[in-house]
């Protein structure tokens, strides 16, 4: 008698069990089929050199209206993220800033109410928490400070307690160069990047804060070449971005094997879908438009302009735009992870942030922290040369 369990998910068309494929591979085939059918409907083909002449619209007004409605009331399903409330401000405000759609700017009243609420999230000893009366948290702190910077008002700038912020950062700094995400919390790559990015914005980044960070991140680079969240775990697109961005900010990029990281990032672009996966053997996901897409930008900065080809990033920029524009726009507004998923603020922000990476390439100048990407210097790589698509 056959002892194998009867699992209909592993059965072929004749009802016989097929154990030759894992669930991961079956899911990959299913997603590929859906996306290839969507591409076929508009006669798009990844890798076709003529595809850049086609036009696929980014529905800016639709997405801006969707986000704007949510500012005055977030659907109840998002209550599971209640402990990270500043992220909603950042995701939504950054999306509106990227879309830059007339008629959907933040009002003075919305800015004032945002400042008042985030002020209530700032801990008396420094740093912002995920909500009022919560402990300061490096990730929520990053979201709060960036949201305030997007508001771009004198009041928004002045509510941040810079000395308290520095004290908070040093209180979570660890001897091995890492930072714990909050008091008695875990340490991973998010905390390092979130702290360094905010410290750079507030001009409080110093050698004490960055001490031994390069050594810690080097321990997190895996045999694949990517960067993990902590030592001895799996390389991941989000952690790769956080790790390299932190090294760029700390001027410690020589701590890791940059060529190996770039090779890992190149392998994350999906051959048929055009978008990126976040880890080996995972599905395409539009948030990695940014987390992995921006790695190419950072690699070029870290290598002093060596990691590009004739000014273009070392991935198929048109294919990434196609995945975003053809497969990830929700007809009711907002961006989705992949076909079949619902729109959310996280994927809307990072999908569009990655779209900007795919639309722009490096300029002829290389300032200390980043590039000058303007009308005269920056290369622009558009699918269809449609000005309405530009972010």
Image (tube, rainbow, N blue to C red):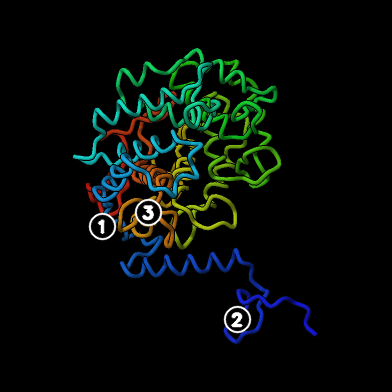
Bin the neighbour count of mark 1 within 10 Å (Cα to Cα): few under 14, some 14-19, many 20 and up. Answer: some
Residue 324: which disc?
A: 3
Is the N terminus in the top left, top right, bottom left or bottom right quadrant?
bottom right
Q: Are circles 3 and 1 on residues that touch, CB within 8 Å?
A: no
The residue furthest bottom is: 14
Vertical order, 317 against 378 (above or below): below
Residue 12: which disc?
A: 2
The residue closer to the viewer here, 195 or 182, is: 182
- Position in image of residue 235 (x %, y %): 62, 45
Vertical order, 199 against 347 (above or below): above
Vertical order, 153 against 13 (above or below): above
**Comparing marks 2 and 1, which lies closer to the viewer?**
2
Helix, strand or loop at disc 2? loop
Please tell me in which quadrant of the rendered image residue 336 appears: bottom left
- Position in image of residue 113 (x %, y %): 32, 28
- Position in image of residue 30 (x %, y %): 50, 68
The answer to whether residue 178 is left or right of residue 359 is right
- Position in image of residue 261 (x %, y %): 58, 42
Image point (46%, 26%), residue name:
121
Which sits earlier in the primary sequence, circle 3 or circle 1? 1
Q: How far is disc 2 from disc 1 in space, using C-alphas?
A: 40 Å
């Amino acid at each position: 008698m056959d002892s194998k369990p009867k699992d209909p998910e592993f059965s072929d068309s004749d009802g016989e069990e097929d154990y030759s494929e894992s669930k991961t591979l079956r899911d990959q085939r299913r997603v590929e089929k859906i996306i290839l059918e969507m591409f076929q409907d508009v006669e798009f083909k990844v890798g076709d050199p003529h595809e850049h002449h086609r036009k696929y619209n980014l529905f800016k007004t639709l997405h801006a209206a969707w986000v704007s409605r949510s500012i005055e009331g977030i659907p109840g399903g998002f209550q599971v993220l209640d402990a990270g409330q500043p992220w909603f401000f950042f995701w939504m405000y950054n999306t509106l800033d990227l879309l830059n759609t007339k008629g959907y700017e933040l009002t003075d009243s919305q800015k004032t109410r945002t400042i008042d609420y985030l002020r209530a999230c700032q801990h008396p000893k420094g740093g912002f928490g995920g909500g009022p009366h919560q402990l300061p948290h490096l990730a929520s702190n990053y979201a709060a400070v960036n949201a305030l910077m997007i508001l771009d008002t004198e009041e928004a700038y002045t509510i941040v307690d810079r000395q308290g912020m520095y004290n908070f950062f040093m209180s979570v700094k660890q001897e091995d160069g890492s930072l714990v995400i909050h008091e008695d919390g875990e340490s991973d790559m998010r905390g390092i990047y979130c702290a360094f990015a905010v410290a750079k914005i507030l001009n409080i980044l110093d050698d004490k804060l960055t001490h031994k960070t390069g050594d810690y991140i080097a321990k997190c680079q895996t045999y694949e070449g990517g960067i993990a969240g902590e030592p001895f775990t799996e390389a991941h697109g989000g952690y790769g971005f956080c790790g390299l961005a932190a090294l760029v900010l700390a001027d410690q990029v020589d701590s890791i094997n940059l060529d190996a990281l770039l090779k890992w990032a190149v392998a994350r672009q999906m051959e048929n879908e055009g978008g990126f996966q976040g880890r080996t053997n995972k599905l395409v996901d539009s948030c990695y438009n940014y987390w992995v897409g921006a790695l190419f930008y950072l690699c070029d900065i870290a290598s002093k302009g060596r990691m590009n080809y004739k000014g273009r990033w070392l991935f198929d920029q048109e294919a990434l735009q196609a995945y975003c524009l053809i497969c990830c726009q929700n007809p009711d507004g907002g961006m989705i992870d992949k076909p079949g998923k619902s729109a959310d603020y996280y994927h809307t922000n990072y999908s569009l942030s990655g779209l900007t990476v795919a639309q722009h390439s490096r300029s002829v100048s290389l300032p200390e922290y980043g590039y000058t990407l303007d009308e005269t210097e920056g290369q622009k790589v558009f699918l269809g040369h449609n000005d309405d698509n530009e972010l």
